[in-house]
Image (cartoon, helix red, strand yellow):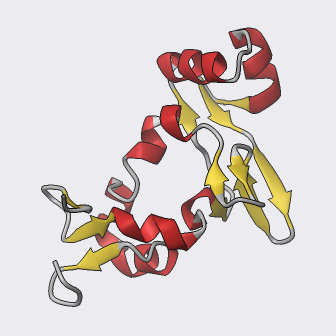
């Protein structure tokens, strides 16, 4: 079974097998927002065996009308609070937010493929890599 994913409208593909050696570079780096929906809050809370109110207080912050997952500053980097730096894995991987599940196919990267390739070694560009 192929680990290569393609998505219409994107001029690159993604080789998910690269995740095994990348050490979670998409979970750490520049500060940003990882938005979560109501359903995602419920799913993550359940996985962590927390009631939703406790989960929201401990792991999220409000940005405008949305909730985003907190980050932890590590040297000059920002890690998602669920990124386990020692093992280089996501502690909520099975219920990770849609925003994480859809990476690297974000509209933002449609015109910033070079930037994306610096972050994600699994990105393969048509004409440059095997596609």
Q: Quadrant of residue 69?
A: top right
Which residue is at a point 65% across and 42% down the rendered structure image? 91
**Front in this rendered view, residue 24 or 64:** 24
Position in image of residue 114 (x %, y %):
39, 82
- Specify the quadrant that holds the N terminus: bottom left
Which residue is at a point 52% across and 73% down the rendered structure image? 21
Q: Tell whether 116 sits left or right of 66.
A: left
Q: Quadrant of residue 43?
A: top right
Q: How many marks?
A: 0
Position in image of residue 53 (x %, y %):
75, 10
Most extreme residue toward the front is 1
Which residue is at a point 46% across and 65% down the rendered structure image? 19
Q: Tell whether 13 sits left or right of 65.
A: left
Position in image of residue 100 (x %, y %):
47, 46
Q: Tell whether 88 sits left or right of 18.
A: right
Q: Tell whether 60 sits left or right of 74.
A: left
| Up/down of 43 relative to 110, above or below | above
| Up/down of 28 relative to 64, above or below | below
Position in image of residue 4 (x %, y %):
23, 64
Which residue is at a point 43% across and 73% down the rendered structure image? 116
């Amino acid at each position: 079974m192929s680990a290569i994913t393609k998505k219409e409208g994107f001029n690159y593909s993604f080789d998910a097998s690269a995740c095994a050696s990348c050490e979670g570079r998409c979970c750490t780096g520049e500060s940003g927002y990882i938005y979560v929906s109501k359903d995602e809050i419920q799913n993550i809370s359940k996985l962590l065996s927390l009631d939703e109110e406790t989960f929201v207080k401990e792991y999220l912050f409000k940005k405008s009308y949305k909730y985003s997952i907190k980050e932890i500053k590590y040297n000059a980097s920002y890690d998602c609070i669920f990124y386990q730096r020692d093992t280089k894995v996501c502690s909520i991987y099975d219920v990770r937010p849609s925003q994480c599940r859809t990476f690297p196919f974000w509209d933002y990267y449609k015109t910033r493929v070079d930037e994306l390739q610096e972050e994600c070694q699994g990105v393969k560009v048509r004409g440059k890599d095997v596609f």
